[in-house]
Image (spheres, rainbow, N blue to C red):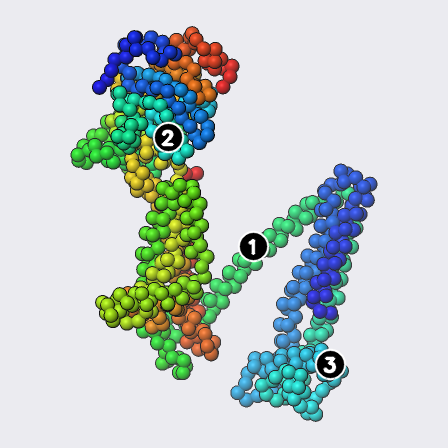
Amino acid sequence: MPVLWIVIIILAMAAIGYVMGRQRALASAGGDPRNLHSLPSYYGSSVAIFTMVFSFLVLIVWLIVQPIVIENQVAANIPPEMVREGSTLGLMMSDVRRVADGLDQAVSQGAMDPEAASNIRAEFTDVRDRLGAIGVALGSDVGPAVLRAAQRYRSLNATGHMFMAVVVLGLAAAGFILAYLRSHKDFRARNVVETTIRYLLIGAASIAILTTIGIVLSLVFNTWEFFRLYSWTEFFFGTTWSPSFSGRGGSSELGFVPLLWGTLYISFIALAVSVPIGLFAAIYLSEYAGPHMRAIAKPLIEVLAGIPTIVYGLFALLTVGPMLLSVFGEGGLGWMQAGTAVMTAGLVMGIMLIPFVSSLSDDIINAVPQAMRDGSLGLGATHSETVRQVILPAALPGIVGAILLAASRAIGETMIVVLGAGAAAKLSLNPFEAMTTVTAKIVSQLTGDSDFASPEALVAFALGMTLFVITLGLNILALYIVRKYREQYD
Amino acid sequence: MKTMLTEADNTVATVPAAGPRDTKIKARKVQVYYGDTHAIKDVDVDLEDKAVTAFIGPSGCGKSTFLRCLNRMNDTIDVARVEGEITIDDEDIYDKKVDPVQLRAKVGMVFQKPNPFPKSIYDNVAYGPRIHGLAKSKADLDVIVEKSLRRGAIWDEVKDRLTAPGTGLSGGQQQRLCIARAVATEPEVLLMDEPCSALDPIATAKVEELIDELRESYTIVIVTHSMQQAARVSQRTAMFHLGELVEFGDTKEIFTNPTEKRTQDYITGRFG
């Protein structure tokens, strides 16, 4: 039975359960809701919940576990000597899966009857031809071992699905009956629903946390793998970045320093642009602008934050780069060779970060109590003296937090760099030269054909890990500073 | 500059015969609007030099609003509009030539809730003198700070920790620090907007004592909700109700023998 049908049946049972549970509870109270412990809808919900929760949980777990178990079973049944020369068990298993899928498709299209699909023998039938005829292309001829494994894979899968349907629907029915029988006027249905909701929320939160842990662990393990192939001193202290894809290891130089330099240089320029502009905009909006101006200007500035970074990248490549080139390039000062440069990417990234700085700073400046302003104005300070000497110092920790958050955004930015800064990993002080960043190099190391066992591909994880540690550090620092600031007025 | 207000100069009907003291602040037909709300109606009042005047009245009666007219703090509120004439030393403070910033240096203000800046105690007091350039040197500034803190009756408590943040003091100390801060710019008038409402009785007593001392050097106007406080610290009392000045006169007179029924009702706690 397909999974979709199982889901629909369970949902239908839950819906019926809701109505029936509600009615049974009402009936037990003599039709008067005031005699019930909880509102009638809670009794209905508790039946629906008992019908759905456990059956869906088992369904999800089963769907995840079954392929793994079957794969292991089938793989264990392939004798090692049957694995072809130059191939691996993993590659062979992917053949098995494709053949099994092909057979499934053949059966569903009517080109083979189910009997035949489970019984055909590679020795007598050209499976590749038969499957090719219905549009399933296979890379090589199907050997008897693969075919037999594929057939076993299919039959195990079919059995597994059947058991799954029985178990899941059985659970749903059991939950239904149990909860239905409990729907009595003294049953504390509201508390049951409340508890379920709590676990649901805990579940959502833990999925987010577990995913984060999973990502970090995958980064850690792959980074570990990389450092087994490549010396960590050369990675962290090497000043040359020249990966080679033809040779395996050895001939590549994977020095992290030029990438880090590019990242920091571009981020620095971006912050040099965005911090003053963003901060002044925030001061204007929160201290000087009237309510009408503010209502128009603030959303307009925040529109900048909604522009996809690839569009900024285009802007860098097509507008800012050529503009800078016409001033600093051959025709002008002669410092710049091409439109892609640190300055181009930095300027555009700075524009992108303005709303981050201004929006957060604006909130923080607004959070400075009016009493501070009154106190300063009451002493005969002018508006700008008040801003400079009282409001900004009071808001400074929060503003620093905002700037650090913007910095971690800048460090993690990719598209603008790819399009605006070029791809050359260089150690140079000239802001008009092309350079590249950690993120842009991660992209270029992993796009295209890459062998995930080579240091050239695995270095991406080491780069990602380092970047992650840097931005995490910045974020923690920012949060720490912002929190410390909050304590001042509460 | 200062004019003597004689008994003959009796344009204000509700003002009984004033004592032989100088008039520092004179208000005539003052109106304040907050948007469409008419918050202050036709207030005429003469405030004496070197004396404490208390503004009393139920909440929302406009006494704080009127106080804020005296140093043009209402200018900072967009929707507020002030009409009429207010003079300090016969100079119209709403004249175009008058710089509100200069005015506020001359008319200091202490707020309801202590609002020390998140700076050191020293910097809090030095703030005003610094922005007005009152000190020629660091030593000069030190002298001003010490003098102001002594005037604020808080010097002995903070002299050993001038670099500690002003926000770390207790509520009463913070308020006295704010008074010291206001005094440091050498104002002629001190406006106090319910300066003791956030303080406990002991701190209140200290601040009241301080107000009594400061009376010798400044014209003090204090808004208060406490009848006892008004009776204790002020020489003159003005009673506001619904934006109008109900009665104005010597404090003793107002508290013992008010002419208006509304004043009597308010003082005896029958409304407000």
> In the image, what residue type sits under mark 1?
Ala
Q: Give the structural element (helix, strand or loop) at label 1.
A: helix
CA gap, disc 1 and disc 2: 50 Å
Query: Compared to B32, does A293 lie above or below?
Result: below
Crowd around label 3: few <14 · some 14–19 · many ≥20 (10 Å): few
Q: Give the structural element (helix, strand or loop) at label 3.
A: loop
Give percent across and percent down for residue B104: 29, 29
From the viewer's perspective, is the residue at label 3 or at label 1 nearer? 3
Badge 1 sits on which subunit? A
Indicate the quadrant where residue A336 lies.
bottom left
Whether tag 2 and tag 3 are in contact, CB under 8 A, the answer is: no
CA gap, disc 3 and disc 1: 46 Å
Of residue B195 and residue B56, the one placed in the foreground of this image is B56
Q: Is the residue at mark 3 from the same chain as the one at mark 1?
A: yes
Indicate the quadrant where residue A286 lies.
top left
> In the image, what residue type sits under mark 2?
Asn
Give percent across and percent down for residue B110: 34, 27
Whether tag 3 and tag 1 are in contact, CB under 8 A, the answer is: no
Crowd around label 2: few <14 · some 14–19 · many ≥20 (10 Å): some
Question: Is residue B52 visible in this depiction of the protein?
Answer: no
Q: Earlier in the sequence, mark 3 or mark 1?
A: 3
- Seen at 42% across and 7% down, the residue is B257
Indicate the quadrant where residue B100 lies.
top left
CA gap, disc 2 and disc 3: 86 Å
> In the image, what residue type sits under mark 3?
Gly
Q: Which mark is residue B74?
A: 2
Query: Compared to A200, does A286 lie above or below?
Result: above
Q: Which residue is mark 3?
A: A110
Q: Which residue is mark 1?
A: A205
- Seen at 58% across and 85% down, the residue is A139
From the viewer's perspective, is the residue at label 2 or at label 3 nearer? 2
